[in-house]
Image (cartoon, grey):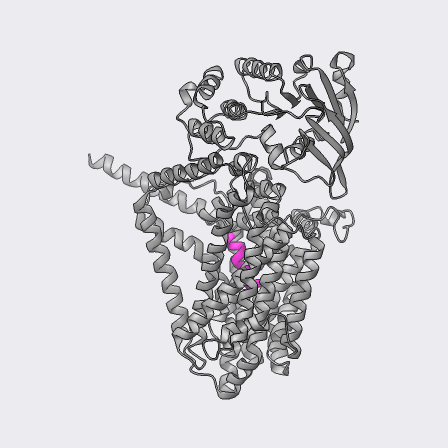
Amino acid sequence: MSDISLTALRDLRRTRQKHRLGNLDWFEAAYRAYLWGGFGGGSILWISSSVKDGRVNESTAASVLQHGPAVLGLLVAIAFMAGIRGGAQGGPLALEAPDVAFVMLAPVDRRRALMRPATQRLRSALFAGALAGAIVGQLAGRRLPGSLVAWAAAGALYGATTAFVWVGTALLAHTLHVPRWVATLLGLAAVAWQSAAVAWHIPGPADTAGSLGLWGWRQHPVDLVAVGLGVVAVVTGFVLLRRISLDALARRSALVAQLRFAVTMQDLRTVILLRRQLNQEHTRHRPYVRLRPARSSHSGITGTVWRRGWYGLLRFPITRLLRMAALAIGMGVLQAAVVRGTTPAFLGTAVLGFVLGLEVMEPLSQEVDQADRADAIPYPRGEIMSRHLIAPAVALLPFAVVAGAAAAITLGGTTDAIVGAAILAYPTVLGAATGGVVSIVRDMPSPFSSSNQQAFMPPEMAGFTTTIRLVWPIVVSALTTCSVLLPRLALRHGDSTTAAAMRAALGVLLVVALTGYWVRVRDALRARIRAFMEEGRAYSSGQRSSAA
Amino acid sequence: MTASRPGVAALSTHRLSKDYGDRPALEPLDLEVPEGQHVALVGHNGSGKTTLLRMAAGLLDPSDGEVRIMGHPSGSLGARRSLSWLSDSPTFYDDLSLWEHLEYVARLHGVQDWNDKAEELLTRLQLSGRRDDVPTTFSRGLRQKAAIALGMVRPFDVLLVDEPFVGLDSNGKATLLELLDEAAAVGATLLVATHELAFVTRVTRLLALRDGAIVYDGPPADADVHSLVLPA
């Protein structure tokens, strides 16, 4: 890079930073930090305080020591798979579109120009990994031998190593131009091998990285090899930055700008949609099964919407189906962890179920995205939207089987576990997915409200509604996933777990039914409330006129 | 103009092709555009014009084959030094004024005395009054003019332009034609993809693409341009 170009690049960055700082609304930034700090900190404290089941017994502790590295290594293997596949698909860097057009097409050394975005990517991944690791580490420290500080530090080290692995493999896969099928194969091989290590206690490729997570209790210096390998991968990736594909950068730049905007707007549905585009995940040209032409009995609105739902669902790409299956497995394992005593795990199940809901409710999402078309149909919108829930609800059945099997296997495959999983799996998966429904339908533009309404709210109220808006769908999911606490209670008291599971399933199905009803009558309810408010305003104004 | 290399084509492709899955966007293409030639690229929507230009600019990886700009592989340092690319959908930083954009682009390309050139371009494109505004707030036509200024403020041997007339008013179109003529007059090679058939009469060579393959390559006077831009 010539000195002039290098100076120009530095000057540009300085100028842009100056502009950004000048345009920053400091009060709003501080208020956002306060809200997030309060909410995030409160959540961590709440989760931490709810892990109070006391120290694990000796046999459990020995089991953690024996199997912990393999289990934690599985997450590292998954990070490896995500990194190598992401890199082969054009990740992990994302530049602004003008940077691609002006900087990357200028006669500058691309490696030096890309060093800053690459370092920023690594920094944010390290921060997120270390923070998440530290939080989980101090949770583990409440039940396992060792101090909380040591566990938090070990968790942070493990999280940071996972981040190194992710960024490093992504950079290497991208710069070495690893074909996508090779990346998928390598990633799957790593995950499969590590899964085998978890299941059959054979040595796994990520055991040493996983072992770092137990450093709060005991330390094996050999584990540092994993850190070294992660660092080497990142450094090699940085050295090879010149080989980054401009094609991928150009494609990602536009999507990433939209993605950042969607994240700012807390629009999770758009975030998921854009992430699919980033990963170049397209629906299939041909469906897995071609539906036969509609019979006359299917020509009603229910049949029409049902068929439309399956047209979309049968075009899901295999990668999305696999991801949904992985989410279902995660849900099953976490619910089993709740039964075993880790109560906050039901929140994890809720989040996974919520994401599964966003995935499977694609036909409903498409309808919400095409609001003008939906409004042009000569039926109340709620009638259409509620019918869009039916096909995805049926499509969730196989995923419920997967989740139930994962839970039953994790719980040792006892009769109680199998019966409980069989009763609760479908209601729980369906119930957790209703959070996704709430998120999608909530974002539907309403003909009765104005976007200006929130602009006139006092800041405290606006912040509160923003938080509620963000959290509400997850709360709905969590309401259903906490149902597993009933059979756990029955198990502890020696009562019938089958009866408890059935009671829990009924409760969940009630939440599902209420959500479906809400989708159906939401517009009508809002219209009624609005009419009531208008009536009240008209009455007050009449009173004032007569008093005058 | 940067230093030219005698005997080297300004733009050449060898077995260049692109496909998206099982859909070919550009059939294997061998093409040579000598220095100083003024080429119009025409074809129906989806015929492969933008794909060819983006591969030449180094913004799109070919499925096979290669592109060279002034003898340098597309996307290499030498190619980037010689080539100016004007996209059909220009992008801008949302925190830099038009003047700051011009300064930045000119300096990235090693131009030190850029002020006079930038001033002149803004005057001719009737953007002088907007120099301190952020171009992301501009209308479609003004954005196009801003992109033209950015493409022209730096030196180049080869100018690749994709649909430059879209959104421009009649004054803007006239100014752009003048600027293209001036660039051609000093020896730059121009490759302009356009649906503006009136422009085709001004060029020295016409290339017509249909469904990813070249169906005409010759002087515009001999071609029935209207039939060439129809899909098969």
- Examine the rendering and report whether any part of residue A152 can be seen: yes
Q: How many marks?
A: 0
Q: Residue at x 71, y 39 (%)?
A: B62
Residue A419 magenta-highlighted: no
Q: Residue A217: image x %, image y %?
A: 46, 79
Specify whether B212 is left or right of A113: right
Task: Find the residue positioned furthest to the left.
Answer: A548
Asked if residue A341 is positioned above or below residue B72 in the image, the reply reads below
B70 and A338: which is toward the camera: B70
SS assignment for the magenta stretch, majority: helix
| Image-quadrant location for residue B10 | top right
Asked if residue A297 is positioned above or below residue B78 in the image, the reply reads below
Asked if residue B77 is positioned above or below residue A60 in the image, the reply reads above
**Where are the magenta residues, as a range?**
A430-439
Q: Residue at x 67, y 47 (%)?
A: A282
Quadrant assignment for the C terminus of chain B: top right
Q: Residue B174: image x %, image y %?
A: 56, 13
Q: Residue at x 54, y 46 (%)?
A: A94
Q: Residue B140: image x %, image y %?
A: 52, 25
Specify whether A539 is left or right of A440: left
Quadrant assignment for the N terminus of chain B: top right
Specify whether A401 is left or right of A42: right
Residue A437 magenta-highlighted: yes
| Image-quadrant location for residue A410 | bottom right
Q: Residue B153: image x %, image y %?
A: 51, 24
Specify whether A346 is left or right of A17: right
Asked if residue B105 is positioned above or below residue A393 in the image, the reply reads above
